[in-house]
Image (tube, rainbow, N blue to C red):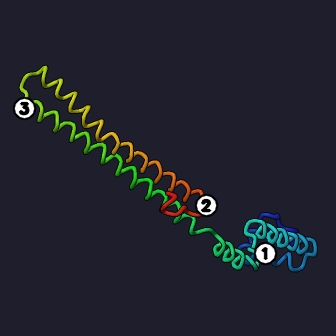
């Protein structure tokens, strides 16, 4: 009977599937016991590295998916759309009213011609426009704030207020 092979040689032959070491281990109780230990250890290592998922995994995942609050995401987008639309409308109004101020100033300049009168006219025109359009601006800001609050309420998830409340 040949002497017991080196462990590394034995395991290398085990990987290859053949070799004099394996032939020896088939007749040697000590080497056969070693190889059996190695087999069990390898099995445990594979189990640690790649644990099998529990049998109920798919059922659990599907249950979670069914329960997940998909509508909340839609609520967020609705609220964002409301916020962006109202903000855009408010900014657009401010921009156009600024243009209106500029047109009024140019009109006064061409009518009066005198720089002092132009400045006075410009200021009084701007003041007049502000005093009349100021209410509209204030109303617009109120609308923007209210619609923002409406959007925030929807984000929080409380039942949306009725149109009259908004
Ligand atoms: Zn041996």
Residue at mark 1? 20
Q: Mark 3 or mark 1, which is nearer to you?
A: 3
Q: Toward the viewer: 90 or 114? A: 114
In percent of the image, x 85 and y 76: which residue is there?
24
In percent of the image, x 35 and y 42: which residue is there?
135
The mark nearer the N terminus, 1 or 2, is: 1
Local SS, label 2: loop
In the picture, measured across the screen, residue 59 lies left or right of residue 10, that is: left
> Is 65 above or below relative to 150?
below
The Cα–Cα distance between marks 3 and 1, rounded to whole angstroms, is 111 Å
Q: Toward the viewer: 49 or 103? A: 103
The mark nearer the N terminus, 3 or 1, is: 1
Residue at the far top: name it: 116
Local SS, label 1: helix
Mark 3 CB near ligand 1 (8 Å cut) = no
In the rendered image, residue 111, in percent from the top left (x then y), is placed at 7, 31
The Cα–Cα distance between marks 2 and 3, rounded to whole angstroms, is 56 Å
Residue at mark 3? 110
Residue at mark 2? 158
In percent of the image, x 11 and y 35: which residue is there?
107
**Local crowd at mark 2 within 10 Å, few (<14), some, or many (≥20)?**
few
């Amino acid at each position: 009977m040949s002497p017991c092979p080196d462990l590394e040689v034995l395991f290398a032959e085990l990987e290859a599937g053949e070799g004099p070491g394996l032939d020896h281990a088939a007749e040697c109780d000590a080497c056969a016991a070693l190889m059996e230990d190695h087999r069990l250890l390898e099995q445990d290592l594979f189990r640690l590295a790649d644990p099998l998922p529990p049998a109920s995994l798919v059922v659990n995942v599907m249950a979670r998916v069914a329960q997940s609050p998909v509508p909340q995401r839609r609520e967020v987008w609705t609220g964002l759309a409301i916020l962006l639309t109202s903000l855009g409308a408010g900014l657009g109004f401010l921009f156009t009213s600024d243009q209106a101020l500029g047109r009024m100033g140019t009109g006064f300049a061409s009518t009066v011609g005198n720089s002092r009168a132009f400045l006075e006219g410009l200021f009084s025109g701007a003041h007049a426009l502000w005093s009349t359009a100021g209410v509209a601006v204030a109303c617009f800001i109120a609308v923007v704030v209210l619609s923002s609050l409406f959007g925030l309420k929807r984000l929080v998830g409380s039942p949306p207020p009725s149109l009259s409340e908004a």
